[in-house]
Image (tube, rainbow, N blue to C red):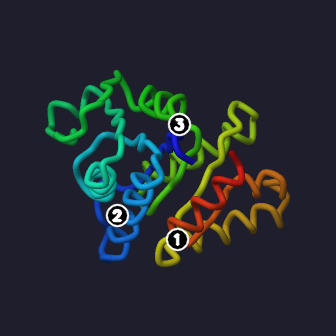
Amino acid sequence: MKGRKLAVYCGSSSGNLRCYSQETVALGTLMAKQGVTLVYGGARFGLMGALADSVLAGGGDVIGVIPESMMSSEVAHPSVERLEVVASMHERKARMMSLAHGLIALPGGYGTLEELFEALAWSQLCLHTKPVGLLNVNHYFDGLLRFLDRSVEEGFVSIQHRRLLLEARSPVELFNRLSESF
């Protein structure tokens, strides 16, 4: 995966359990070791900040993409040298998508889920062919995965489109799954 760029969607908070930050740091460390550039939302807080910090600590490359409105509230990560400022959240998502060879979602809230589902919907509509992965830390996404399986059972999502989402419980396993899709 050396030379690839991965867009990672994740929380601007760290969650209540230490395992979320630990697995996020493990992913960032692996990205740096594998020579994979991080493309992310540009924030210094929460899982986003932990991810950027771990990639930077491992000597990896980081590209932050942040809306102009968030620059004034000191949300931007001060150590990210390549920080692209865009006009809106919509432009942020589009820019992250255009920069990346693949996309990963970690635990997060509404914004993370919205970004994940937009990436999946765009893939379903053949607007991109990039792999979309989900790091299911501590079974965080189990309910969501059951919902997606139910959507298949009920005829709202085809099995082919359900398979667009690659799932794993560890960063190494997710990297292996993504590598098969490049």
Q: Which residue is drawn at 70% across and 63% down?
A: 148
Q: Which residue is drawn at 29% across and 30% down?
A: 83
**Mark 2 or mark 1, which has the lower sequence index?**
2
Secondary structure found at label 3: loop
Q: Could you tell me how far apart the alpha carbons at marks 2 and 3 are, in whole angstroms?
A: 20 Å
Relative to residue 148, is residue 96 depicted above or below?
A: above
- Count of numbered badges drawn on the protein: 3
Name the residue type under label 1. Answer: Ser
Secondary structure found at label 1: loop
Q: Name the residue under label 3.
A: 100
Crowding at dot 1, Cα within 10 Å, few <14 / some 14-19 / many 20+, comes out as some
Name the residue type under label 3. Answer: Ala
Give the image location of residue 99, x and y in percent.
50, 31
Q: Name the residue under label 1.
A: 170
Give the image location of residue 17, x and y in percent.
32, 77
Name the residue type under label 2. Answer: Val
Q: In which quarter of the image is the C terminus?
A: top right
Q: Could you tell me how far apart the alpha carbons at marks 1 and 3 are, in whole angstroms?
A: 21 Å
The reply to whether the C-beta atoms of the residues labelled 1 and 3 are less than 8 Å apart is: no
Q: In the image, is 59 to the left or to the right of 151?
A: left
Q: Name the residue under label 2.
A: 25
Give the image location of residue 161, x and y in percent.
78, 51
